[in-house]
């Protein structure tokens, strides 16, 4: 079995706009470096071609408005399809680890998609998780460790009430960076409370801090939760040279993190220091994933001394680690009715901004509080792009009998309600996406 | 107009073939057994045999496809060579376990050819001692990203030439492609076989060359190079045998299809190659030889252990399997073990040795299995076709999984599948028709199918290519193969068109410099162009143009004069 399957797709002919960070040039230097290092034909690494994700594969995870055809471009389908190819390689035992090194990224894409947020339209990791479950069954336990500098709010949104998924996001504190969320208090919905783990880190956190979080928080949590698969959403914008964030991580740090985590699957997320960081992080990551010597990987421009993590910053990281692990250890003692209220429904309202496409979305969400399953959800959504109100009924991957029946009743009620221009029902375990 | 004579010789594993061409016609085709202990003697034998048919007086060109370099590498007979590498940070060279020692030197060139840290000059002083006493031992100098900026390699060569007396090979001169481990291997092998090549050339100097004019060596990419070049870049002469066959197809085939599969059936192995859009496909990075991955431009050829003399095995439930092992001499020629060739002979599909012996052989084996001898022979031929077809399918599957990096290519992948089969090699007339039928494709067996390789060698012409890379932000343009590096004076105006134009100009200059006819068409083999944006502002462009001066192969008519 090959150590690493590499699904590399730099989309050399696609950009959000010509000077956008998500442009043709983004993975050019990474390609050059991997090629020059000879890693495309290293015996431990094998390169694979991505494919387009099918409608079915996308709609298992997303509700796309006004339509799939309208909102999703070929580039998004290829990125999502590439992650599916990567997961198949691992499931089929062709490789031990697979790395979907491709663009555009996905972790800001929510369950409901009206357009592009944070350069993302389709959530590549989420489509990957649902593909794994589609092939291996709803009982599968998958952990996502998102190490992008930005909070993985999209992935959090999708799995927020999903007991089959543990979502851990390490990111620069939301008070200082897009999307402004990802605080420790965001812990998941009533059906999966505690399985959304946010680790906001102070700007300037470097190798020491990141690896401390891995050792003190991430690895112990994974050890206890025992996932069947671990996915690393490997954003590379936590690098000290990244132009749009303020973290201080290095290529050596990233390789070490990869070695510690040893994820089954890795998916590239952000990372816009395309010349000074990405080529070296990706070489380090590939080597670490393949179990090869990465000790000599080094960026041409070194971190300045003032960019190294200060002592007081380390203390802040220690406090975050303590808070997160302390809650994790006591999560079963939390009384859910104190968080979500008593009764049969939990309700929340949200405004979601799509920065890339400049769209505002309003959501009204209801979650059935069920003791036998994660409960059905109903979401009313409308946006400045498509003002019509759309009703979405979502079933969990493992619905109880009662929730299955009730969800159908909800669907019927919404269909009868004149306010809704469209009603969509998603039952992922039954592979059903009904419009 | 005077007639133009040429000789092509292809040294194969079993036979050495020689062809004499006059303009576009085959005058003579001869075959002698290859003498593995003395390749030169069998080569000379073939040469003299074919020269018997030459009646002209003008000197004639000789195109040689030898297995000399290939064998030297495969049999590990290359001379030891020292390797001095400037790896900079990245993959630890020691972890790659090269089967030869490498001396590492400090210095760091980045992916755009910017010097991050200079060569460690203090270490250079110590190199003489580290390299040992032998001042004449061949030397390979290789830097990471030297194809983007060769100055470290050039400086090292200048320093080491002060005392070193032997052959020195620099990585950037051999290829403009990216791949440092392959560059190391290529440069090392080039240095290692340099002396072999010199010895070989020495022999040809002493030979009575009376009717011979220029001698050219066939390369793995199907082109030729002159002797001076072959002394500098002997590594390019590896794997010229499969290239000769492909050139034979290009010279002889009447196939009008844009895509076809070339099936070269030999005694031990069958080679598959793919023609797409009228051109034979090349390896993405370069040739692989004896496990060494190189940057030597080469046709993409996949070899399978299936041939006319393959061994047969019968297993209950499995039926008959052919190869991958080679059997001895076929029964029809007095051997012990039946081969696919014997099946063809017994059934009257081929004339070789004794048909009676072959028939008896099948009857004997058939009797032990309880089947009729001739039906058993037919089953062997069917099994051969089946295995060949599976290999062709697997080959195209591999091609169809080659990585693609643009959305356009992924949405509209190039059509690779063949619409015809072109076969060559002695057993081709037996097996190609059945393969064509099985694949439901029209087929062609080359005329002179048993000597098409020698004809291909004779019909081949010189190829020269360069890799131009321009970085308008850095204001530099580089052509590593020529050791060319210049400043761009007006970077804003250095467009991709300008890059193409310069690349073409330089390709011709390079061809002239090396002594080749530079009047053919310069093709652009590969091209890339990117805007470089920093902080929402376009700061420059990067262009890559890979060219090839590729004159058409001499077409040869399928009949003797």
Image: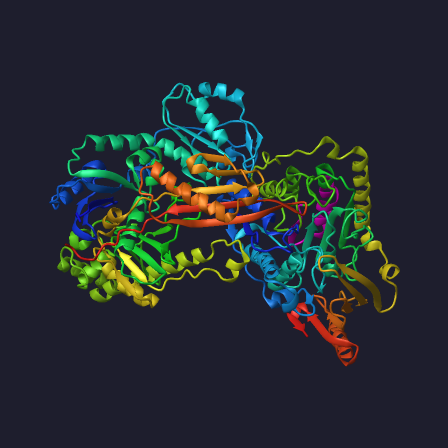
Any magenta on residue A235?
A: yes
Report the number of discs. 0
Please indicate whether residue B375 sits to the left or right of residue A285 in the image.
Answer: left
Residue A312: % across, % down: 82, 35
B153 up-or-down from A231: above or below: above
Residue A28 against residue A62 in the figure, above or below? above
Q: Is residue B269 visible?
A: no
Q: Residue at x 38, y 20 (%)?
A: B135
Q: How is the image coloured?
A: rainbow
The quadrant of the picture occupied by the C terminus of chain B is: bottom left
Left or right of residue B89: residue B163: left
Asked whether residue B244 is in view, the answer is: yes
Residue A141 appears in which quarter of the rendering?
Answer: bottom right
For this orientation, the residue located farthest to the bottom is: A416
Instruction: Please tell me which residue is depicted at 15% across the width and 57% down the height of the picture.
Output: B357
**Residue B188 picture location, percent across and down:** 41, 33
Stretch of the chain drawn in magenta: A212-236
Q: Nearer the viewer, residue B365 or B404?
A: B404
Tell whether position B343 is magenta. Answer: no
A139 on left or right of A85:
right
Please name the residue shown 76% across and 61% down the image: A161
Q: Residue at x 33, y 41 (%)?
A: B238
Q: Quadrant of residue A405?
A: bottom right
Where does residue B159 sit, x and y in percent of width and height? 46, 22
Of the pair A259 and A314, the residue shown nearer to us = A314
Pinpoint residue B187: horizontal percent, then vertical percent.
Answer: 41, 34
Towards the viewer: B280 or B33: B280
């Amino acid at each position: 079995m090959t150590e690493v399957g590499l699904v590399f797709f730099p989309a050399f002919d696609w950009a959000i706009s010509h000077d956008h960070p998500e442009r043709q040039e983004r993975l050019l230097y990474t390609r050059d470096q991997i090629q020059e290092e000879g890693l495309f034909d290293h015996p431990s690494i094998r390169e694979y071609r991505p494919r387009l994700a099918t409608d079915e594969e996308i709609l298992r995870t997303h509700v796309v408005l006004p339509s799939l055809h309208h909102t999703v471009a070929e580039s998004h389908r290829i990125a999502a399809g590439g992650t599916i190819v990567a997961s198949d390689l691992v499931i089929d035992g062709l490789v031990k680890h697979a790395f979907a090194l491709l663009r555009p990224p996905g972790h800001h894409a929510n369950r409901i998609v009206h357009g592009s947020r944070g350069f993302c339209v389709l959530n590549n990791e989420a489509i990957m998780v649902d593909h794994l479950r589609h092939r291996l069954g709803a009982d599968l336990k998958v952990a996502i460790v998102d190490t992008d500098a930005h909070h993985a709010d999209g992935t959090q949104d999708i799995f927020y009430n999903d007991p089959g998924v543990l979502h851990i996001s390490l990111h620069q504190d939301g008070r200082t960076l897009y999307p402004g969320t990802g605080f420790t208090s965001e812990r998941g919905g009533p059906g999966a409370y505690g399985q959304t783990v946010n680790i906001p880190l102070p700007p300037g956190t470097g190798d020491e801090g990141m690896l401390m979080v891995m050792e003190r928080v991430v690895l112990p949590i994974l050890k206890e939760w025992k996932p069947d698969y671990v996915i690393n959403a490997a954003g590379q914008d936590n690098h000290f040279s990244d132009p749009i964030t303020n973290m201080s991580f290095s290529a050596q740090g990233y390789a070490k993190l990869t070695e510690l985590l040893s994820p089954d699957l890795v998916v590239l997320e952000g990372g816009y220091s395309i010349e000074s960081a990405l080529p070296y992080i990706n070489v380090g990551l590939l080597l670490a994933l393949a179990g090869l010597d990465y000790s000599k990987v080094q960026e041409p421009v070194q971190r300045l001394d003032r960019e190294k993590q200060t002592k007081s910053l380390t203390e802040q990281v220690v406090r975050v680690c303590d808070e997160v692990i302390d809650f994790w250890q006591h999560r079963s003692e939390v009384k859910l009715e104190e968080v979500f209220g008593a009764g049969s429904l939990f309700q929340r309202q949200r405004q979601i901004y799509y920065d890339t496409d400049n769209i505002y979305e309003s959501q009204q969400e209801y979650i059935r509080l069920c003791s036998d399953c994660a409960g059905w959800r109903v979401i009313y959504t409308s946006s400045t792009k498509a003002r019509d109100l759309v009703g979405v009924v979502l079933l969990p991957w493992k619905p109880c009998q009662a929730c299955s029946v009730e969800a159908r009743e909800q669907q019927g009620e919404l269909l009868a309600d004149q306010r809704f221009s469209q009603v969509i029902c998603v039952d992922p375990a039954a592979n059903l996406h009904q419009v | 107009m005077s007639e133009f004579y040429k000789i092509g010789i292809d040294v194969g594993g079993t036979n050495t073939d020689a062809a004499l061409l006059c303009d576009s016609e085959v005058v003579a085709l001869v075959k002698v057994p290859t003498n593995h202990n003395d390749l030169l003697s069998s080569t000379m034998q073939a040469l003299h045999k074919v020269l018997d048919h030459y009646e002209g007086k003008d000197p004639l060109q000789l195109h040689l496809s030898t297995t000399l370099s290939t064998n030297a590498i495969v049999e590990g007979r290359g001379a030891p060579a020292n390797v001095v590498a400037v790896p900079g940070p990245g993959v630890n060279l020691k972890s790659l376990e090269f089967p030869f020692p490498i001396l590492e030197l400090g210095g760091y060139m980045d992916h755009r050819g910017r010097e991050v840290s200079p060569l460690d000059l203090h270490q250079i002083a110590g190199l003489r001692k580290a390299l040992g006493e032998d001042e004449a031992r061949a030397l390979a100098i290789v830097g990471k990203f030297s194809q983007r900026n060769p100055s470290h390699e050039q400086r090292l060569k200048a320093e080491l030439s002060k005392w070193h007396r032997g052959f020195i090979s620099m990585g950037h001169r051999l290829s403009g492609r990216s791949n440092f481990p392959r560059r190391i291997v290529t440069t090392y092998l080039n240095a290692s076989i340099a002396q072999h090549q010199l010895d070989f050339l020495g022999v040809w100097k002493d030979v009575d060359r009376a009717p011979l004019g220029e001698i050219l060596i066939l390369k793995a990419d199907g082109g030729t190079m002159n002797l001076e070049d072959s002394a500098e870049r002997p590594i390019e002469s590896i794997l010229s045998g499969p290239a000769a066959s492909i050139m034979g197809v290009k010279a002889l085939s009447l196939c009008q299809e844009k895509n076809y599969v070339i099936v070269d059936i030999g005694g031990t192995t069958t080679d598959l190659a793919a023609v797409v859009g009228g051109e034979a496909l090349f390896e993405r990075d370069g040739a692989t030889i004896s496990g060494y991955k190189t940057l030597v431009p080469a046709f993409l050829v996949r070899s399978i252990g299936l041939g006319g003399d393959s061994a047969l095995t019968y297993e209950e439930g499995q039926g008959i399997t052919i190869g991958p092992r080679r059997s001895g001499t076929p029964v029809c020629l007095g051997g012990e073990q039946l081969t696919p060739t014997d099946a063809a002979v017994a059934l009257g599909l081929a004339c070789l040795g004794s048909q009676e012996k072959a028939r008896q052989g099948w009857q004997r084996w058939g009797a032990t299995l309880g089947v009729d001898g001739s039906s058993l022979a037919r089953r062997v031929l069917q099994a051969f076709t089946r295995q060949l077809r599976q290999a062709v399918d697997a080959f195209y599957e591999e091609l169809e999984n080659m990585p693609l990096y643009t959305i356009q290519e992924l949405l509209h992948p190039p059509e690779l599948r063949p619409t015809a089969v072109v076969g060559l090699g002695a057993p081709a007339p037996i097996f190609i028709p059945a393969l064509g039928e099985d694949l439901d494709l029209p087929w062609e067996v080359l005329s002179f199918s048993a000597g098409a390789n020698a004809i291909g060698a004779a019909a081949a012409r010189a190829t020269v290519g360069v890799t131009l890379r321009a970085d308008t932000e850095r204001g530099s343009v580089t052509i590593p193969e020529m050791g060319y590096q210049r400043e761009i004076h007006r970077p804003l105006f250095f467009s991709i068109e300008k890059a193409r134009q310069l690349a073409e100009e330089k390709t011709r200059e390079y061809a002239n410099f090396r002594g080749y006819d530079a009047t053919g068409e310069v093709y652009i083999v590969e091209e890339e162009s990117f805007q470089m944006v920093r902080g929402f502002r376009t700061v420059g462009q990067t262009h890559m143009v890979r060219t090839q001066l590729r004159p058409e192969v001499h077409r040869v008519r399928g009949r003797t004069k």
